[in-house]
Image (cartoon, rainbow, N blue to C red):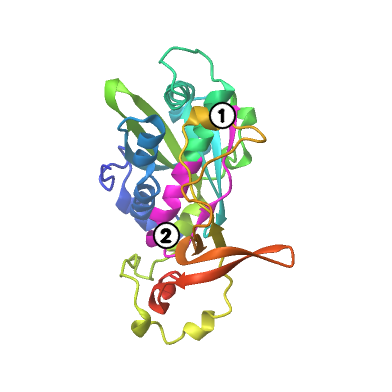
């Protein structure tokens, strides 16, 4: 993707905003820019897979503005998606597609010819919602190294906003300042779709501080092995971590997903009897076999990674 450190909006001074961040708690634009790059790092590959053609996503710039200024720069109507954090950070992003951008992207994801429909259909909604969920899964992996904690998102919700009265409170509070990240997806045959990502001041400040030392530097050191594990690890031995068992995965086209109904069978990439993967903090740490214990399912471990590798999952 194109670096954006020098692409903030005309008339916008990173140095002036950085000074305000000290006095007023405004997040530094450089850190928001770095976050935006990580957030959209996997968006191009996801769209390439979903649309079956090469798509690149470029982050164009970031800007700090009011909700009124947002409405002037990104006119209604919108297709608005709520991206709420389930773990790792607190708050919500709003993913904004203008009406024309939503139609272009919805057509392409649904495998329709351009101009086949002039209205935003339920099939377009489902295609965009599923694609954004996939982008969030990729973003969670990319951002883990940046903010030094595991994150996940709740399922995406989508609404069509025709006028300002239907806006959520976070985007209509006149005293709230927002961060706006502009991006575009481009591909062959002139394909282009613009979209925006917003975040409120509280979420931006949290993003700016997690994983950072008082000097403002983001630690990017490689995970340490067991021999170099922190001597105070005993202080986190009672921390709860999410454990998941993955039976297998499948890749499907949007049109096939929309045809699913009760009774449909989704074929996974593992054969019956194959070992299942055990994940902690979304990282694979062991393999095992499914067992039944007093009418409950369990997993008997058959292999496990080294203690040094398991320490890495705590980072």
Q: Quadrant of residue 222?
A: bottom left
Q: Is residue 215 above or below residue 160?
A: below
Q: Where does residue 232 sit, x and y in percent of width and height?
A: 46, 85
Residue at 58% x, 48% y: name it: 154
Residue 108 tag number: none
Residue at 74% x, 67% y: name it: 294
Span shown in magenta: 133-160
Other residues around mark 2 within 10 Å, as few (<14) / some (14–19) / many (≥20)? some
Kindly report the distance in space between the C-alpha atoms of the residues bearing marks 1 and 2. 31 Å
Residue 271 in the magenta stretch? The answer is: no
Q: Where does residue 23 sit, x and y in percent of width and height?
A: 43, 60
**Observer-nearest of 238 and 174:** 238
Residue at 49% x, 57% y: name it: 274
Q: Is residue 289 above or below residue 239?
A: above
Is residue 52 something one can see in this rendering? yes
Residue 258 tag number: 1
Residue 149 in the magenta stretch? The answer is: yes
Q: Is residue 303 above or below residue 153?
A: below
**Observer-nearest of 261 and 199:** 261
**Observer-nearest of 208 and 293:** 293
**What element does badge 2 sit on?**
helix
Q: Where does residue 142 sit, x and y in percent of width and height?
A: 38, 54
């Amino acid at each position: 993707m194109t670096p954006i450190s020098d692409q903030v909006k005309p008339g916008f001074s990173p140095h002036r905003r950085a000074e305000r961040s000290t006095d007023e708690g405004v997040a530094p634009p450089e850190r928001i820019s770095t976050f935006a790059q990580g957030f959209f790092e996997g968006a191009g590959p996801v769209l390439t897979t979903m649309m079956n053609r090469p798509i690149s996503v470029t982050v164009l710039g970031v800007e700090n503005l009011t909700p009124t200024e947002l409405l002037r720069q990104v006119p209604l109507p919108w297709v608005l998606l709520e991206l709420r954090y389930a773990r790792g950070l607190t708050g919500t992003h709003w993913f904004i597609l203008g009406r024309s951008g939503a139609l272009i992207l919805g057509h392409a994801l649904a495998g329709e010819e351009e101009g086949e429909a002039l209205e935003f259909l339920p099939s377009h909604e489902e295609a965009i919602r599923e694609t954004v969920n996939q982008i969030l899964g990729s973003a969670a992996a990319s951002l883990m190294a940046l903010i030094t904690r595991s994150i996940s998102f709740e399922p995406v919700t989508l609404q069509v906003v025709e006028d300002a009265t239907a806006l959520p409170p976070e985007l209509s509070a006149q005293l709230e300042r927002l961060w706006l990240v502009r991006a575009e997806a481009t591909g062959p045959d002139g394909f282009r779709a613009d979209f925006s990502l917003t975040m409120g001041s509280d979420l931006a400040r949290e993003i700016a501080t997690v994983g950072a030392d008082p000097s403002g530097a983001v630690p990017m050191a490689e995970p340490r092995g067991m021999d170099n594990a922190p001597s105070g690890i005993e202080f986190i031995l009672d921390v709860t971590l999410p454990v998941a068992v993955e039976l297998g995965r499948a890749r499907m086209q949007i049109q096939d997903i929309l045809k699913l109904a009760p009774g449909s069978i989704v074929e996974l990439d593992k054969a019956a009897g194959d070992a299942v993967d055990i994940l902690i903090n979304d990282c694979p740490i062991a393999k095992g076999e499914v067992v039944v214990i007093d009418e409950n399912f369990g997993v008997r471990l058959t292999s496990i990674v080294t203690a040094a590798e398991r320490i890495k999952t705590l980072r």
